[in-house]
Amino acid sequence: MNETIGGSKAVVLSIGQEFHLKLGKDRIYYAGMPSEEVYSIVQRKSTGYQGYAWNLYYQKRQRDITIDGIRLHVERVTPEEIAIRIT
């Protein structure tokens, strides 16, 4: 789900859902919470039929992150979904 809030795009991702950060940038997926205090986002880079991905792990209290040069603000995170805003 995407919505615009104050000029920035808010995105809610459930586990396994994809979001394309920006044209020419990577795609991310929400991978859930491997523990109560840690959440994971998968970053995927691809060109044509080739690609690779890796998990990024963040403390639940960390709200401002940067992925592929794009600054994101985590508004809320649960084991089932994450709400992020591009800043």
Image (cartoon, helix red, strand yellow):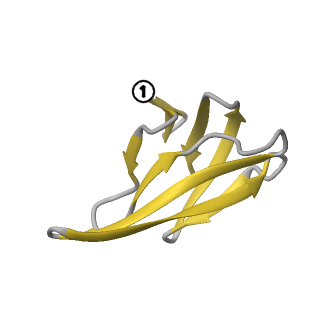
Q: Is residue 49 left or right of residue 35?
A: left
Q: Residue furthest left?
A: 48
Residue 26 drawn at (x, y percent): 38, 64
Can I make out residue 74 in this image? yes
Quadrant hosting residue 27: bottom left
Residue 30 drawn at (x, y percent): 53, 43
Q: Which residue lies at the image location 61% right of the left edge and 35% below the top edge?
A: 82
Give amino acid for label 1.
Met
Q: Which residue is mark 1?
A: 1
> Element type at marker 1?
loop
**Which part of the image, by quadrant, shows the N terminus?**
top left
Q: Which residue lies at the image location 57% right of the left edge and 43% below the top edge?
A: 85
Quadrant hosting residue 67: bottom right
Q: Which residue lies at the image location 42% right of the left edge and 37% below the top edge?
A: 17
Residue 68 drawn at (x, y percent): 49, 70
Is 39 situated above or below 55?
above
